[in-house]
Structure formats: C-alpha cells, structure tokens
Image: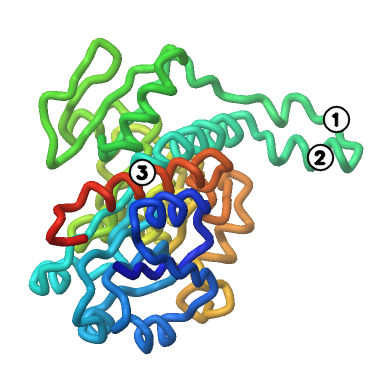
Amino acid sequence: MKVLITDHLHPLLAERLRAAGMDCDVEPDISNEEVMASLHAYQGLVVATKIRVTEALLDSAPDLQFVARAGSGMENIDQVAAGLRGISCVSSPEGNAGAVAEHAVGMLLALLNHLPRADREMRQGLFRREANRGTELFGKTLAIIGFGHTGSALAARLRGFGMTLLAHDKYKSGFSSGEWLECDWARIYREADIVSLHLPLTPETHYLINADCLARFEKPIYLVNTSRGPIVHTVDLIDGLQAGRVLGAALDVFENEKPDTFGPAEALWWEPLRAMEQVLLSPHVAGLTMESRFKIAEVLASKILALPPSVK
C-alpha cells in the first residue's frame, strides 16, 4: 500500500507505517492541486488542515482506501463522499486533547489576571498594581460545552481550582461524576461565569454562540474558544464585549485564519478584537505542543494499522 503524508507530522508516523510494510511518501509542502494530480497512485492519504478532501479530490483517487486526519476536526474532509466510496476516515483527537486543555487553562488564567497587559506595562516601566488586580477561578462556575476528549481533559485539569464544573454534550449522557455535573443549557444560562467551547465545526454548531445565545446568560460571562472559529459569531461577541454581557474572551481560533485573505468582512471583527484589552488572542496553537506532535502521530499510526485488512 502506498500512503501520501501531506503535512509536517512527527516522523514516527511514517516509521510505524513503513515498519508495517507500507510505502510512505512524505510531502509536507504539497498543495491541494498537486495532491489531486498524484493521488491516483495512492491507497492511503494523511492530512492535517491545509488539504481539503473534497468529492472532486476523492474522484481523482480510485484506489484510495483511507483518509487519516492528524488532529481532531474533520470539517476539511467530505466524510459522506468518502463513505459512499468505501473509504475509511480516522482522526486523532486523543493526541492533542491535553495540549488544548492546558492552553485553555493558561489563556483563562492570563485573561483573568491581566498578565499580557501587566507584562507589557512592566517592560514600559509602568508599575500599576490596582489597575491589574485579577479575578480568581476559585468559586466560579465554568461550563464546558462539548465533553469529548478535549472537554473532559479540561475538566480533569481544573479539578484542583475549587470551581463548579458544568458540562453539556448533546450526544453524550451519563458522564456526571463527583467533580463535574452533566447539565442542560438552561442551567448553564443561569449559573455560568465562564464558558469554554470544545465542539467540532458542523452545520449544527456554526454560529452556535450568537447574539441570542449571549443574551440568555443571567450574568456576564468570560468566553474561551479553542475549538473552531465559526462556532462563534464574532461580530455578536464584540457587541457582547462592548455591552458588558461578555467580560472577556480568550480566542485561539477565528472565523478566518488566513490574514492575507482578509477583506471588509474580517475588518468588522479583526480590528475591534485587536483593540480590546479584555480579549486574549493566540494563533490557533492550542493543540501544538512538542508532546502533542508525537502523540498525534502515535495515535494516528495505531488507528491506521488497526483498520480492517480489506482496507490495508
């Protein structure tokens, strides 16, 4: 079996597949067009985020047997088209769930304690204590929306902070424990101080957090999004921040993550976000750690090798 690996993944992935007898070509800088032109020669395809596995691309690969996604989100893969062609799809959310969870905690602590501003002011010679008085996590209620690999990893990391942890997952039930409580949106709207999003991007979750949603919270909240940018209607979030319904936001993901393509639509939210002191931004790096690079490759290799013999 020939496998095309299309991103800068840990060498462990290719090593394990080759050890199992697969012929792997590693082309981390290959373009979508180049993949389409060459995929007819492969039976396996490994992608991260840059390659769009569309129906047209799948049509160019009559012998393709599997598509493996390094990471969690599958929105760049047409899974319906793959299924109709008998192509297996696997991903590796277990590989970077811990990294994303730790990043969310770090962003939340930095946001509530004004650390970016305090650091910047200190470097400017400003020693402003009262202006940088922080807010503690202890005693707060945090709602985790989506209790899969990452949501549950976040809950595990917050256990020692003395918080009330609420969790909601439309597709899971029975996961309450002594440390977190499964609940519905009604309770989240009543009690949440902080909301952290850990959802895939689907038609159902697109713009889930919008003006109507934000208006339902009975007290101002902090919002953390380390999942997918279009889950949040950014202009509505900015309105909430300006009105005080949202006290602060920590965002690792955005509706458009290609600044060279920004136009008038992005100007409506990018400039306001950059100007707000109560907003903390990072460039979609929550899942990118030294450890997660290895873990993603390890998980993905195991899942590929566990595919039925008819696939391999």
Is the Cβ of the residue at disc 2 closer than 8 Å to that at disc 3? no
- Residue 298, percent from left and from top: 41, 43
Residue with the mark numbered 3: 299
Q: Of 300 and 127, which appears nearest the observer? A: 300
Q: Residues within 10 Å of mark 2 (few under 14, many from 20)?
A: some
Q: Amino acid at mark 3?
A: Val
Q: Of 2 and 100, which appears nearest the observer? A: 2
* Mark nearer the N terminus (1 vs 2): 2
Up-down: is 157 above or below 84?
above
Q: Quadrant of the C terminus?
A: bottom left
Regarding residue 239, the answer to whether it shows in the image is: yes
What distance separates the C-alpha of mark 2 from that of mark 3? Answer: 43 Å
Q: Quadrant of the N terminus?
A: bottom left
Rendered residue at 52%/38% (across/down): 103
* Mark nearer the N terminus (2 vs 3): 2
Q: Amino acid at mark 2?
A: Glu
- Residue 185, percent from left and from top: 19, 36
Q: Secondary structure at mark 2?
A: helix
Up-down: is 257 above or below 140?
below
Is the Cβ of the residue at disc 1 closer than 8 Å to that at disc 2? yes
Residue with the mark numbered 2: 121
Q: Amino acid at mark 1?
A: Phe
Regarding residue 211, the answer to whether it shows in the image is: no
Question: In this rendering, which labeled residue sits more in front, label 2 or label 3?
Answer: 3
Residue with the mark numbered 1: 127
Q: Residues within 10 Å of mark 1 (few under 14, many from 20)?
A: few
> Which quadrant would residue 5 be assigned to in this image?
bottom left
Horizontal side of 261 relative to 128 (left or right) equals left
